[in-house]
Image (cartoon, rainbow, N blue to C red):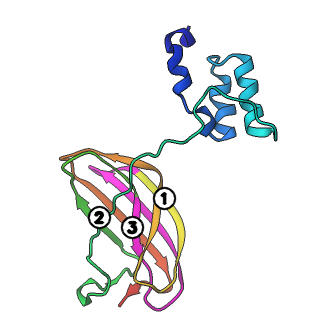
């Protein structure tokens, strides 16, 4: 029985930090929780008068995000760019395992502009993650975050390629 194997460790699982849908489609159907625990957790999600739960209610803090920059700033003339619909990519390797959540992309220096973007992370030509989405820049010199659906694990001493293809009416930064 899985519940017996888990013992008291079951009550270290942060079930209430899941979404209601994740709980209903996962833990509630796992046959690990008792019917009373399942009922109490459903009430905790939905009722105004919430029952007391034995599970931790606070989400994990997770890893602190770190940023690395291709350019020191967009203010230097040498950092001007023009996409023209082509793929812009960087090949890189890291000296310890990391997780890549997404890319920071520059927008137009000419004011507000909307872009369609495709970002990809590849290892040896195999796509590990991609996202097709849109973002709006406001003409400032900051980067705009475009994220993958989930952070992707990148192993040390292995080459990866990250790429972006933008489409929009203002595809340059000067």
C-alpha distance separating marks 2 and 1: 20 Å
Q: How would you rate the neighbour count of disc 1 (Cα within 10 Å): few for under 14, some for 14-19, many for 20 or more?
A: some
Which residue bears the numbered disc 3? 164
Residue at 61% in and 39% down: 18
Dot 2 falls on a residue whose secondary structure is loop
Which residue bears the numbered disc 1? 131
Q: Can you give x and y, in whole percent of width and height, for residue 169 in the image?
A: 50, 85
Q: Is residue 24 magenta?
A: no
C-alpha distance separating marks 3 and 2: 16 Å
Q: Can you give x and y, in whole percent of width and height, for residue 123 in the image?
A: 29, 49
Left or right, 53 with reference to 129: right
Q: Can you give x and y, in whole percent of width and height, for residue 16 in the image?
A: 63, 36
Mark 3 or 1, nearer chain start = 1
Q: Are marks 3 and 1 in contact (CB under 8 Å)?
A: no
Q: Is residue 116 magenta?
A: yes
Instruction: Tell me the quarter of the image containing the C terminus.
Output: bottom left
Q: Are marks 3 and 2 in contact (CB under 8 Å)?
A: no
Residue at 30% in and 86% down: 80
Left or right, 116 with reference to 68: right
Q: Nearer the viewer, residue 113 or 86?
A: 113
Looking at the image, is mark 3 or mark 2 nearer the viewer?
A: 2
Q: Is residue 164 above or below residue 149?
A: below
Residue at 21% in and 54% down: 93
**Magenta highlight range:** 102-128
Which residue bears the numbered disc 2? 68
Looking at the image, is mark 2 or mark 1 nearer the viewer?
A: 2
Q: Is residue 94 above or below residue 7?
A: below
Labels in figure, total: 3
- Which image quarter: residue 161? bottom left
Dot 1 falls on a residue whose secondary structure is strand
Q: Main secondary structure of the magenta part?
A: strand
């Amino acid at each position: 029985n899985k519940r017996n194997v888990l013992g008291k460790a079951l009550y270290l699982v942060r079930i209430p930090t899941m979404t209601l849908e994740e709980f209903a489609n996962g833990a509630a159907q796992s046959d690990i929780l008792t019917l009373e625990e399942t009922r109490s957790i459903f009430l905790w999600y939905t009722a105004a008068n919430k029952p007391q739960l034995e599970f931790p209610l606070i989400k994990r803090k997770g890893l602190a995000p770190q940023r690395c920059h291709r350019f020191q700033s967009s203010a230097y003339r040498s950092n001007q760019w023009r996409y023209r619909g082509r793929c812009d990519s960087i090949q890189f390797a890291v000296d310890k395992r990391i997780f890549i959540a997404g890319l920071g992309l520059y927008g137009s220096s000419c004011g507000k502009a909307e872009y369609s973007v495709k970002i990809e992370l590849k290892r040896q030509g195999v796509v590990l993650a991609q996202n097709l989405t849109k973002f709006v820049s406001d003409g400032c010199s900051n980067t705009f975050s475009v994220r993958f659906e989930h952070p992707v694990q990148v192993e040390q001493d292995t080459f990866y390629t990250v790429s972006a293809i933008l489409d929009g009416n203002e595809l340059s930064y000067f």
